[in-house]
Image (spheres, rainbow, N blue to C red):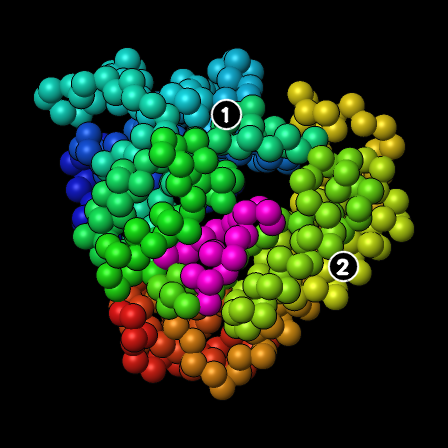
Amino acid sequence: MKSSPPDPARPGFHTVTLGCKLNQFDGAAIEGELVRRGYREAGDPAAAQVIVVNTCTVTHKADADARKLIRAMRRASPDCSLLVTGCYAEREGVALQAMDEVTRVFGNREKARLGGILDDLGIDQRETRARIDRGCDNDLPRALYFGERSRAFLKIQQGCRLACSYCIIPEVRGPSRSVPPRAVEQALARLIAAGYREVVLTGVNTGDYGRDLDPKLDLATLLRRLFDRCGPTRLRLNSLEPLTVTDEIIELLATEPRLAAHLQVPLQSGSAELLRSMRRNYRRETYLDVLKRLRDAVPEIGLGADVIVGFPGETDALFAETYDLIEGSPLNYLHVFSWSSRPGTPAADYPNRVNPLVQRNRSRTLRKLGADLSLRFRSGFAGTRLDAVALGHRRDGRYQRALTGNFIEVDLPPRSVEPGQPVTVRVGASSAERTLAVAEGSPSWA
């Protein structure tokens, strides 16, 4: 889990990953390949001979952030090989390659043959060049590098078969594909052997896992197989679409202590009219029923949602429907996005666009609601004991961070426990900025 001490004689690499946890996994695979080739991680891009920017394209702002970052990386290291990949590179590769700052662009589908790309560019520090890997983009690499991070990510699925009117991801990630269970088990075993005690299972539509396999499988079955092998390591599901939250998943969340009591269930809108326009495959009532079943079965569970504001046609009244649904729901966290047109999606041609100023005000309103829900949730655990995994220290050194199973980041006294290790914490007072806690031993599953 720990990175090796820097060797100044070895050329440096620097990577920046934007966007989702699946992209974080891809970033770790890229870093793993560079480490395998003899490069060392350079915290300062100015000291890097190779820089990789792993992009996101979920919104217009994500595209702009990527371009800004590419220019900043070139200014920091004028002579580096600057590679750009990820979803924005998949969608707008020609435009990105035309940027003066960029050495080479490669999309998501080429990430699996990174070794060959490096060879093509002459970026190789070993005496013998690697065999060019032209494998499937859903293969799991043997080399994953998470640096000093205390948690690891593991891709089990990518792509999506849904057709939401606003979403470009099926175009840049392709159709839903599942990683075979044996490959997932082997990759998990390597992460456990490296010392990780929390592994986050990632995908674009993780709940769709196994439908494309022969024989077919489902996510609950995969989880049971992983629990037979994961020992004292906690698994975490990141996000599940509402209709993929099955009774079997809820039962595992309620009964398996090594499955973190936390789930992100995308909402996008609380308006029935907008859900139809977004081409979402569930109704308001269905969504609320999923949350209720989760809360009833797992009272301490941390529940989050993705929400889009400013979708074409969103009036004040329809926005109020979203606000009211969230305010009266069991949700504890919100990820709020302002809609932006993605060329190639049906919604890009929808009329009745919302004024950007109105979008910003609605985003601010929902973020304030999300902060209130979070504080209420965290405050409810004062005096209770929760299982957590220790993270690193805050920059000011005053606190050590730990993440509970139900997704509360708590602040412990400095050097309470080795980063990456499971710990039981007693939760103290919460404020808007932080939740205090103290370490009290180890969880039973550890």
Query: Label for residue 362?
Result: none
Instruction: Tell me, yes or no, whether the highlighted magenta stretch contains residue 250.
Output: yes
Q: Is residue 132 above or below residue 408?
A: above
Q: How many marks?
A: 2
Q: Specify start and end residues of the magenta stretch as a single range.
A: 235-254
Badge 2: residue crowd in 10 Å (few <14, some 14–19, many ≥20): some
Q: With 281 as the anchor, is 29 left or right in this view?
A: left
Question: Mark on residue 174?
Answer: 1
Q: Amino acid at mark 2?
A: Leu
Q: Amino acid at mark 1?
A: Gly
Quadrant in the rendering for residue 391: bottom left
Residue located beneath label 2 in the image: 325
Compared with residue 33, is residue 267 higher up or lower down, i.e. above or below? below
Whether residue 419 is in magenta: the answer is: no
Instruction: Say if residue 424 shows up in the picture.
Output: yes
Question: How far apart are labels 2 and 1 at the CA level?
Answer: 32 Å
- Between residue 256 and residue 77, name the one nearer to us: 256
In the image, what residue occupies the spot 58% across and 78% down?
Answer: 379
Residue 124 shown left or right of residue 46 in the figure: left
Q: Give percent across and percent down for residue 251.
A: 46, 62
Residue at the spot x=45%, y=53% of the render?
Answer: 237
Question: Of the residues under marks 2 and 1, which one precedes in the sequence?
Answer: 1
Residue furthest out toward the left: 127
